[in-house]
Amino acid sequence: MKIIQAILDDEASEAEKDHFRENMDKCIPCIEAYRLEKCIKDSLNMKIVKKPCPESILNTIISKINS
């Protein structure tokens, strides 16, 4: 499941992607899990409205991290 999430988040290494591609056809639960996770991620992405963070909030967060 970790590899599927890493692939969908584009955080998987090339070796992990290759391993998943090679074994995906042989593993029905893997295919189903991949499709489900992709569907959830796609649905969430359609619902999220991305807005830039106001600079004042960003500065507050940075100052608290640095203190």
Image (cartoon, rainbow, N blue to C red):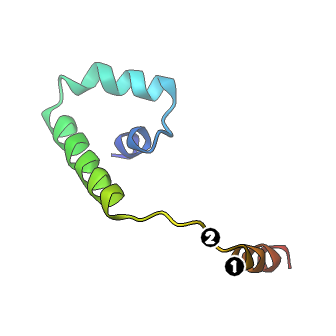
- Asked if labels 1 and 2 touch by Cβ distance under 8 angstroms, the answer is yes
Q: Name the residue under label 1.
A: 57
User: Tag 1: residue type?
Assistant: Ile
Tell me what residue is drawn at x 72 percent, y 73 percent.
55
In the rendered image of this protein, does residue 49 appear above or below residue 39?
below
Left or right of 47? Residue 29 is left
67 or 23: nearer the eye?
A: 67
Image-quadrant location for residue 33? top left
* Residue depicted at 66% across the width and 74% down the height: 54
Please name the residue shown 82% across and 77% down the image: 63
Q: How far apart are marks 2 and 1 (CA)?
A: 7 Å
Residue at figure coordinates x 77%, y 75% from the top left: 59
Residue 30, by quadrant, is top left
Label at residue 65? none
Nearer to the camera, 48 or 41: 48
Q: Name the residue type under label 2.
A: Cys
Q: Quadrant of residue 7?
A: top left
Residue 32, image x, y percentages: 16, 41
Q: What element carries label 2?
A: loop
Q: Which of the labelled discs sits on residue 53, or is there none? A: 2
Q: Residues within 10 Å of mark 1 (few under 14, many from 20)?
A: few
